[in-house]
Amino acid sequence: MIPDIPLIRKDFPILDQKVNGKPLIYFDNAATSQRPVQVIDRCTDFSRLINGNIHRATHSMANKTTEAFEDARKTVRGYLNAAEAAEVIFTHGTTESINLVAHSFGEAFIAEGDEVIVTEMEHHANIVPWQMMCERREAKLKVLTFRDDGVLQLELLNQLINDRTRILAVTHLSNVLGTVNPIAEIIALAHTKNVPVLIDGAQGAPHFAIDVQKLDCDFYAFSGHKIYGPTGIGVLYGKRKWLDLMPPFLGGGEMIDRVTFQKTTYNEIPYKFEAGTPHYVGAIGLAAALKYLDNLDFPSLEHYEHELLREATTKLSSIEGLKIYGQAPQKGGVISFNIDGIHPFDLGTLLDQMGIAVRTGRLCADPVMDHYGVENMVRASFAFYNTFEEIELFYKALIRLKTMF
Amino acid sequence: MTIEEIQQQIIEDFSGFEDWMDKYGLLIELGNELAPIDAKYKVESNLIRGCQSRVWLHQEFTDGRIIFEAESDALIVKGLVALLLKIYSNRTPHEILTSEPRFIDEIGLRQHLSPTRSNGLLAMVKQMKLYALAYEKISQKNN
């Protein structure tokens, strides 16, 4: 099935506008994707008609909110094919999800001298929480490196894992290199050595159908705002066997069973990890986004995005002095690059004048910048609502801008 | 010329451009023309680190005036740095403290002074003012 992109674009009202007098070309989807009208309407309709604090009262408003929130959890469960809805925890986003695991898993299972493995291509959000935990527990952080083409050196993983390894955290899809990591293979290998695996799905979840049971991952984290949903909402999927044994991350309302000044007992999962009033409008909007995606034909969109990437890679590679970082055979819709003699900030500024939104800077991945010995990069990242015409305009814009330097 | 007169001149220089490309073209030209900062001043202690670009700022205080030297790794930022040096270098602390770089807003480049960490430019202006404040205090003490 060939996706009807013009029809899909109509669902995204924000795309139909001019920026600096030019039609908007939005190529910063890896940072934040745009929201379809189905998500926007669901959030505003909900806010207009229903609002009460969840799980806390007997009145109808609170009950309806609770119901919608728990329905959203069921939708996420279905989307991820989690074994049960209780394994779905709502957070502020991927960053909080990973912090939660680093903290609570660390408290429960990591002792002095233990080891945690991350990879060299991780976003800071999948490095720093582990680093903080390792400092606290006097544990050691080990790094699986990648080759210059952006492929993880899996052959080194075997020797990196030892009997002190407690957890491995790896991204599904690199936000800089675009590399799609063979996570099923990594999980299988780690499990042969009884090492649980956390997948940072911030970039992966928006582009691939996820089946956490089939993958057999122990944790999977993703964000609403990168999967066509609202900001400020995210998900942590975790296997019950781990979540049950992990202490709470934050203390407060909803996460408790009974509080006395002598001792507080905690609620069951998922509530144990949802202290305070959650962003329920966000959760409901996220569910609307996942339902929206469910109604599209995911495999054909995956294929279309791949074709966009291929076209962009071919075009950009033909520009003299342009270097693309990350050329893994398995790659998602992300192209990070530099053009000789042009600073990414300058390029980003001028592209914006032409209505083209790209990301520039260090991309929250200092170690990747260090790997290639560069200070910054320009990143174009695609979503299924982008078009081949936009890529052609982008290519022409780069050619034109090159003449200014 | 006073700071205000130079600002007025910059605004006039830029007001002739209809096309954004010409405006940025001039900034790039100014950036290219700016003499590089002496390598010995291009050090960590003079670095103003933005997420997107970096600015190095060096200063010396002679005869009651602050001489600034600065550079950026991004050319557009460097162009703006050149303009900031034009108005703020070789001035008394009092002059620096009593004027704002309003030309950036007037020539339609306000987004480059956004209070984010993005390009280090706003931090550079703040740093220049802090130097001016410090030297003003020192001068008052010595008098």
Image (cartoon, coloured by chain):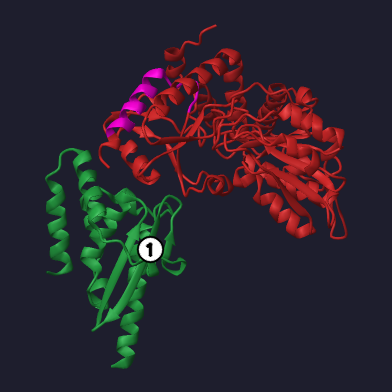
Chain colours: A red, B green
Q: Is residue A387 left or right of residue A218?
A: left
The subunit letter for the residue under badge 1 reads B
- Secondary element under disc 1, as helix, strand or loop, is strand
Q: Is residue B65 left or right of residue B45?
A: left
Tell me the chief SS of the magenta region: helix
Mark 1 = which residue? Answer: B56
Viewer-closest of A161 and A393: A161
Whether residue A403 is visible to the viewer of this picture, yes or no, is yes
* Residue A396 is one of the magenta-drawn residues: yes
Q: Position of residue A395 (x, y in %)?
A: 35, 27
Q: Position of residue A169 (x, y in %)?
A: 72, 40
Give, as a single range, the part of the protein colored magenta: A382-400
Residue reaching furthest to the bottom: B143
Q: Amino acid at mark 1?
A: Trp
Specify few, some or many for label 1: CA neighbours under 10 Å numbering under 14, 14-19, or 20 or more. many
Viewer-closest of B51 and A51: B51
Query: In the rendered view, would you say A352 is above or below A375?
Result: above
Quadrant position of the N terminus of chain A in the picture: top right
Q: Position of residue B113 (x, y in %)?
A: 33, 54
* Residue shown at 66% from the left, 30% from the top: A181
Whether residue A270 is visible to the viewer of this picture, yes or no, is no
